[in-house]
Image (spheres, rainbow, N blue to C red):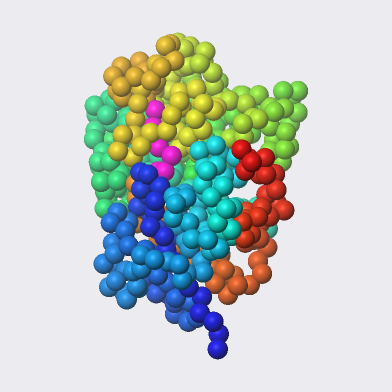
Amino acid sequence: MEKTLRVGILRETKNPPDRRVPLTPPQIIALEELYPNVEFFVQPSDYRCYSNEEYEYLDIPLKEDLRECDILLGVKEVDKRTFIPGKTYLFFAHVAKKQPHNLEMFKAMTENNLSFIDFEYLTSDNGQRVVAFGRHAGIVGAYNGLRARGIKTNKFKLKPAYQCHDLDEMWAGLKLIELKKGLKVLVTGNGRVAHGALETLAVANVEQVTPEDYLSREFDVPVCCQIGPEYYTRHKNGQKFSFSHFTKFPDEYESAFRPYTRVTDILITGHFWDPRSPGFMTIGDMRNPDFRISIIADISCDVNGPIPSTIRATTISDPFYSFNPFLEIEEPAFSKLTNITVMSIDNLPGELPRDASLDFGKMLMSNVLQDLLTETHSPMIERATILQSGKLTPRYEYLIGYLNG
């Protein structure tokens, strides 16, 4: 008789708590039909975007004690006090870049002999991530940028995204606003985040134009432009841009972003930034009289990174602050028109948790769960496995110094 595999859905324990789930109730039912030898259990939660009753209605058992489960799925970092020794965990741990704030959790994972698969490093053979919340980060980040514009100019009002029932309601409200003719919005990056931002801008009737036209022309409609590193950096010795070379040797490049600061009203960042690559702008650029950017929706949220005004992450409940580039300090949001308004929420998909969870679960089901639930050898899962029974796998042995403090 085939053994039963038990999978537990964790209650989120990071503070403030995240409302997203890795799988929705209907998705769990579909998986149990596909894999009859797999049973799912859900740890009760009072703040999950799918209520306990929604799981119970579909006869998915709620269970506080998940020690009988083999695999445990979450979304964000897990409270180290809750780890169950010897189990396999999947969540976004944010440890592979040696993040100091998660070191104690990571140590606890090794001490509990956990096997750990990081969602962030589940990639296809060509390196593309197969599960991510990036699209919804972009969708909500761009919406927040436009919402900040409405508050700052006092021309229109948008409901906070987290107060909308779902994406449809958020976009329905967005369709009612009218943006100023000639408004220019710049989106950085070429991935899911940037494309999500462009979805929101399209709903707001913002027309997309080429980088060349964006820099050289004014328009009688609101416009946006998307640029990748081939536009915002250049090789220091004048070599022709090569993306593969840029990713390998980012320190050989310098910023080419300055012209965009002169023509942009709202900057929405969806790029990936390597600390070895150049910053986008300097404090000096921000103090220049021709610096036009008044709102920065920093979805990338690299604190003290390529954008000097991103000095901390903001929260869903308190999303904005003002940055005074002359004093280099934070001031109350919208306190001075001359300040730069910053939005730097680092968990944006949490504003639309039901939509984001649904999309994430679809990706998980399409790309990962067949191999995981049938215990089939998978190079993709192997690439994302950071710990095996508490020991670093060969791909992640570079973390040994981090683990030792």
Placement of 74 over or under 53, stated as above or below: above
Residue 344 belongs to the span the image colors magenta: yes
Q: How many marks?
A: 0
- Res 158 quadrant in image: top left
Toward the viewer: 200 or 179?
Answer: 200
Residue 384 belongs to the span the image colors magenta: no
Toward the viewer: 320 or 281?
Answer: 320
**Quadrant of the frame with the C terminus:** top right
- Left or right: where does residue 328 sit relative to residue 390? left
Residue at position x 34%, y 19% in the image: 331
Report the residue that reaches farthest toward the front.
Answer: 111
Where residue 134 appears, as percent x and y from the top left, is 48, 48
Where residue 118 appears, as percent x and y from the top left, is 56, 54
Where residue 5 appears, as percent x and y from the top left, is 51, 75
Residue at position x 48%, y 56% in the image: 83
Toward the viewer: 27 or 6?
Answer: 6
Q: Is residue 269 visible?
A: no
Residue at position x 28%, y 25% in the image: 153
Question: Which residues, given as a range, are shown in magenta?
Answer: 342-348
- Left or right: where does residue 296 sit relative to residue 380? left
Where residue 49 appears, as percent x and y from the top left, is 31, 56
- Res 146 quadrant in image: top left
Residue at position x 31%, y 58% in the image: 45
Toward the viewer: 296 or 212?
Answer: 296
**Quadrant of the frame with the N terminus:** bottom right
